[in-house]
Image (cartoon, rainbow, N blue to C red):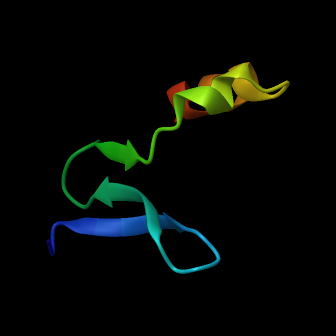
Amino acid sequence: PSSLEVTARTEDDIVMGVRHKNYKLEGIQFHPESFLTPDGLKILKNFICL
């Protein structure tokens, strides 16, 4: 939709993140297994601090 802007894509051009243009609203592709990696908690904290 025109109210969203893409904020992240993969190298294959797949949309992984969006932001609403008028509201403080972010969306990301969520992979729960990524939080079990050594940097998983850091990734989660960085997103929460947006």
From the top left corner, tell me how far across and down residue 14 is, in percent: 47, 72
Task: Indicate left or right for 44 with 6 as reference.
Answer: right
Task: Indicate left or right for 20 with 7 as reference.
Answer: left
Residue displayed at 56% across by 33% down: 47
From the top left corner, tell me how far across and down residue 5 is, in percent: 33, 69
Q: How many marks?
A: 0
Residue displayed at 66% across by 32% down: 34
Q: Which quadrant of the view contains residue 1?
A: bottom left
Is 28 situated above or below 39?
below
Task: Indicate left or right for 50 with 22 as reference.
Answer: right
Residue displayed at 47% across by 64% down: 7
Front in this rendered view, residue 45 or 38? 38
Is 36 situated above or below 16?
above
Is 27 situated above or below 14?
above
Q: Which quadrant of the view contains residue 24?
A: top left
The single residue placed furthest to the right in the displayed view is: 38
Q: Which quadrant of the view contains residue 42?
A: top right
From the top left corner, tell me how far across and down residue 20 is, in percent: 25, 56
Is 48 situated above or below 5?
above
